[in-house]
Amino acid sequence: MEVQESNLRPCPPLIVVSKIEITDSKYKKLIDSLPKEERFPVGLRKYQGFWQFQNGIPGVLAMKEDFNPRPNDVIVSSFPKSGTTWLKALTFTIMHRDKYTFSNHPLLKLSPHDCVPFIELHYALRDKQYLETLPSPRVLGTHVPYSLLSDNTKISTCPIIHICRDPKDVIVSFWHMFTKFDGLMESLSFEQMYELFCEGRVHIGPVWDHVLEYYTKSLISPKKILILKYEEMLKDPTNGVMRIANFIGCPFSEEEMKSCLVEKIAEFCSFNKLRNFDIKQNEGNLKSYYYRKGIVGDWQNYMTPEMANKLDEVTKEKLCDFTF
């Protein structure tokens, strides 16, 4: 069944779950019993080792209990601000390259988050049925750690692609994104966010545990989980495109290689192209929360050498042999 643009619709940003009312008494009782982080402007609770928007936890629980992927689904996962938007655009375009030309592509009108919806968001919004309306093969996204994926997802044949990024750049992008949301976090300085981040007390943190769960599982099941590094992808995006295609079972044919389709997809989904699509979609005003600079090393404009060294030391200690 071919994917049609009419099946896709604009989705709200994931942070809307922080404002969802918890109506299920079972969930409310559980959430009220969980440790709470008071310093974070948006309510966070710690559930099974990870801090999350407390009002989004029911969606994560429902997803864990109920979500059953189709065999040909592809799931893209990440810690927030680690290359999520880019990975969604690349994977969707690679998967559906036989259905769209670059001139009629959904990304010209919709964001990558519309084309690749967050599973937990639709469960939190009590809108899981929307996911069922999407024809196969679906590309779906998630920010939840591996341990909180449904058992059906873990035992399924659907591949999972996880992208990670140097935590120093993650925190800068993370802080900028959250300060854009309706003034929710205007009161939180970068220094305050830095301390919370180092303690792991941010949404879906700690980042090290999040990355380590997927990395460890990838060592055990390399055909199930592919780990991509943001910095390596930026250095050689065409190699990244080919790795994704091979991993999800959609390798490029000799004819496609000769026509430079790999390079064309890398260019079509490049940061500047996606950003320009977003500007046009929003009538010339960049309203999206998902695009800023997309570069490596911007942390140097925000951190002192001491701050950077501290974060590097924490990263080295927590991630052991894994390096960014």
Image (cartoon, rainbow, N blue to C red):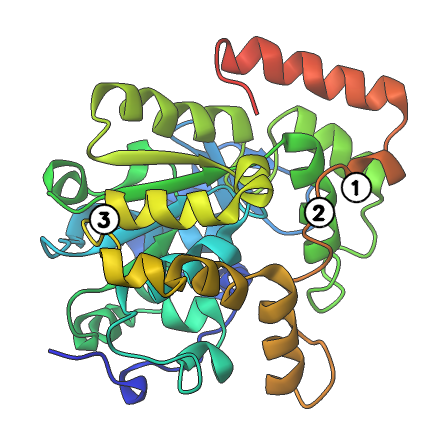
Residue 4, visible in the rendered structure:
yes
Mark 2: secondary structure: loop
Which amino acid type is shown beneath numbered disc 2? Ile
Cα separation, mark 2 vs mark 3, equals 27 Å
- Tell which tag, 3 or 1, sits nearer the viewer: 3
> Mark 2 and 1 residues: CB-CB less than 8 Å, in contact?
yes
Which residue sits at x=21%, y=35%? 224
The numbered dot on residue 248 is 3
Cα separation, mark 3 vs mark 1, equals 32 Å
The numbered dot on residue 213 is none
Q: Which residue is mark 2?
A: 295
> Mark 3 and 1 residues: CB-CB less than 8 Å, in contact?
no
Mark 1: secondary structure: helix
Residue 251 locus on image (x, y percent): 23, 51
Q: Quadrant of residue 156?
A: top left
Which residue sits at x=42%, y=23%? 212
The C terminus, quarter of image: top right
Other-residue count near label 1 (Cα within 10 Å), few / some / many at <14 / 14–19 / ≥20: some
Which amino acid type is shown beneath numbered disc 3? Ile
Q: Nearer the viewer, residue 177 or 244?
A: 244
Horizontal arrangement in the rendering, residue 92 relative to residue 302 (left or right): left
Q: Quadrant of residue 106?
A: bottom left
Cα separation, mark 2 vs mark 1, equals 7 Å
Q: Which residue is mark 1?
A: 298
The N terminus, quarter of image: bottom left
